[in-house]
Image: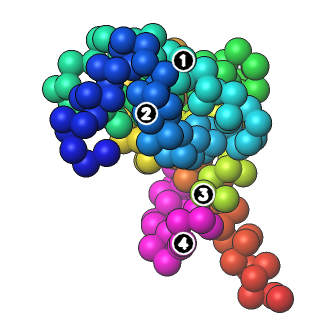
């Protein structure tokens, strides 16, 4: 919503529990937030459920939003946390490795360099599809770091892992993503 005053008016209406204001806010941000959550869960029904729960949390906590930062950023953070909580609760997240040195460093650096070149020509939809094929643990760390721009320290706090584990899982996610993308491109060339 472009006009800050209109947004403020809608938020104030939501705080007063006006149904129409809640509908307007929901309609404005539902699609974007469903996209955010879906990147973590890769299951449409679960994503819808988490977004619904996220909006309940948003409506319950609108009174704490102080209009000093981006409202969309504030909502996005709540939705991201809801998605992470859902993953934790459903125990779908694979065990995050505590050994950040359990892969070959030399191999990983060359693969990451190759991947960076490959990603330049990649379309957004193709990237999202490949990211969705990562394991839940790698996908979560990758989304938080590469897409949501959280630091490894913030990710570690959110997921209750070490900062090194976050870095390791991000590096492994990039390596796995490169392998997935190479496989997809090789399959396309064979057709």
Q: Secondary structure at mark 4?
A: loop
Q: Secondary structure at mark 1?
A: helix
* Tag 4 residue: 123
- Alpha carbon separation for disc pair 1 and 4: 34 Å
- Alpha carbon separation for disc pair 2 and 1: 12 Å
Dot 4: within a 10 Å radius of its alpha carbon, few (fewer than 14), some, or many (20 or more) residues? few
Q: Residue at x 24, y 29 (%)?
A: 8
Dot 1: within a 10 Å radius of its alpha carbon, few (fewer than 14), some, or many (20 or more) residues? few
* Tag 3 residue: 128
Residue 4 covered by magenta stretch = no
| Circles 1, 4 touching at the beta carbon (< 8 Å) | no
Q: Nearer the viewer, mark 2 or mark 1?
A: 2
Quarter of the figure that contains the C terminus: bottom right
Dot 3: within a 10 Å radius of its alpha carbon, few (fewer than 14), some, or many (20 or more) residues? some
Q: Nearer the viewer, mark 4 or mark 2?
A: 2
Q: Nearer the viewer, mark 1 or mark 3?
A: 1
Q: Residue at x 66, y 59 (%)?
A: 130
Identify the mark nearer the N-term, 4 or 2.
2
* Magenta-colored span: 101-127
Q: How did the renderer colour the structure? A: rainbow
């Amino acid at each position: 919503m472009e006009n800050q005053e209109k947004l403020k008016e809608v938020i104030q209406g939501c705080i007063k529990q006006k149904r129409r204001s809640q509908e307007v806010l929901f309609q404005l941000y539902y699609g974007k937030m469903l996209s955010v959550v879906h990147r973590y869960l890769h299951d449409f029904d679960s994503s819808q459920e988490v977004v619904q729960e996220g909006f309940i949390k948003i409506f319950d906590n609108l009174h704490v939003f102080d209009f000093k930062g981006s409202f969309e950023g504030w909502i996005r953070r709540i939705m991201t946390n809801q998605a992470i909580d859902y993953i934790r609760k459903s125990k779908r997240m694979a065990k995050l490795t505590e050994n950040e040195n359990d892969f070959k460093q030399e191999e990983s650096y060359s693969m990451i360099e190759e991947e960076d070149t490959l990603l330049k020509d990649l379309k957004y939809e193709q990237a999202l599809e490949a990211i969705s094929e990562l394991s839940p643990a790698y996908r979560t760390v990758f989304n938080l770091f590469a897409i949501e721009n959280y630091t490894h320290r913030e990710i570690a706090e959110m997921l209750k892992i070490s900062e090194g584990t976050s870095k390791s899982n991000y590096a492994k996610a990039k390596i796995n993503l490169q392998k997935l993308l190479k496989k997809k491109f090789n399959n396309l060339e064979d057709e």
